[in-house]
Image: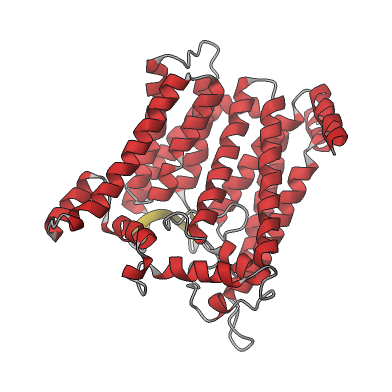
Amino acid sequence: MKKLFENLKLIRRVNWVMMAAVVLLMSISVAFIYSSCFVSEEDPVRMLWVKQIVWGVAGMGCCLFMTMYDYRNLSKIAPWLYWVGIFLLILVLFAGVTIYGARRWLRIYGPLGIQPSELAKIATMFMLARFLSRPNAQPDRFSEVVKVLAMAMVPLLLILKEPDLGSGMLLLPLAFVMMFVAGVSFKFLGSLAGAGILAVLIILGAVMLPERLGIGEEGQVRILKMAGLKEYHKLRIEAFFQPGKDPLGSGWSKMQSEIAVGSGGPWGKGFNKGTQKRLGFLPRSVAPTDFIYSVVAEEKGFMGSVVILFLYGVVITCGIQAAIIAEDLFGRLLCTGVVTLIFCHVFINMAMTIGLLPITGIPLPLMSYGGSFMIITMFGLGVIQSVHVRSCPMVQRFLYDQSVILS
């Protein structure tokens, strides 16, 4: 009972600014999921917004639990979580539910299921934080860097087999940033960045060059397989560079999303009055999920988009602040990992909806419809709060005073 009382007292030290931004984003999410499912007064509205409320409440419970839970204990259970994540990634390849040609879901009961890739991403983050914060860690050794990359590559390759290129590739910037914070030298980091750029060039070459060089379809398929790509990867990349090549197929979502965002203007068309989603030009199957930002931009315009960006900026800034004031390297790495995942999701999703990146199927944290992603995101934010409430009160007070002076 005494331990519970002490943990409850920690709630007073929660970063309420971050929590306010999180609650606002979740509330906006519910409103625009409702709007994205609305067609007309006569047609029944899909009840996804109600489910999103349920997932949001469950996520808040996870966040509160993790706030009271001592984050340092995660170092002990990190290997277990990591291997459970690996096991689920293997299991989904054999027993997963196939949707649109990909096995990414494990059905638990009825419509209830989990997406193992989301659990695997945060479990990998815990494992990397544990490994890089060991008392005898030597992050500048080549063997240490190889081990970190191996830990990230195992779940990455399994996620690619589903296939889910977008989610899998997020593990690379996660490992890169965490190694930077842990003190890996710029020599190694520069080499990894160069290898990443080379890999992107190889992928683009495998997609764009064979057809221009006059290679037949069979040869193009072989080259794609050698590059680890599938046909739908090729179509998405081609749709990014040449959306007019297949405007009614692979280029449709990209073009309609850009129209939705651009047609919003400064103030938008009004809540629930977006024509792109209401008339079905922005596909209703993805409007509440991957393209929820397009719905917001169409109905609330540039100013609404700025509000969303500001709220994400608050969440990310608070996460960075928690990393700065963390009392140990393990806590700093945990906060860094969560912030990196959230930032990558936000950046890629928004860039995808406005045409700056290919369509990847990366959801928008706290806003896109989905249970697994919402709960894992809130779990990660709870880890940040756990670090924050256990950091030095004097440092917290100093940062608060400085922010008041600057404002």
Could you tell me which residue is drawn at 87 percent across and 33 percent down?
A: 405
| Residue nearer the viewer, 309 or 12 | 309
In the displayed structure, 209 sits above or below 332; it is below
The image position of residue 153, as x and y in percent, is: 37, 34
**217 with respect to 293 (left or right):** left
| Residue nearer the viewer, 64 or 173 | 173
**323 with respect to 148 (left or right):** right
How is the structure coloured here?
secondary structure
The image position of residue 86, as x and y in percent, is: 40, 38
Q: Is residue 69 visible?
A: no
Res 1 quadrant in image: top right
Could you tell me which residue is drawn at 73 percent across and 53 percent down?
A: 23
| Residue nearer the viewer, 54 or 396 | 396
Q: Is residue 225 visible?
A: yes
In the displayed structure, 305 sits above or below 310; it is below
The image position of residue 283, as x and y in percent, is: 47, 72
Could you tell me which residue is drawn at 71 percent across and 57 percent down?
A: 307
What count of labels does the image hold?
A: 0
Q: Quadrant of the C terminus?
A: top right
Res 70 quadrant in image: top right
**187 with respect to 328 (left or right):** left
Res 169 quadrant in image: top left
| Residue nearer the viewer, 89 or 234 | 234
The image position of residue 223, as x and y in percent, is: 18, 49
**113 with respect to 264 (left or right):** left
Could you tell me which residue is drawn at 52 percent across and 60 percent down?
A: 354
| Residue at the limit of the structure toward the top, as seen here | 136
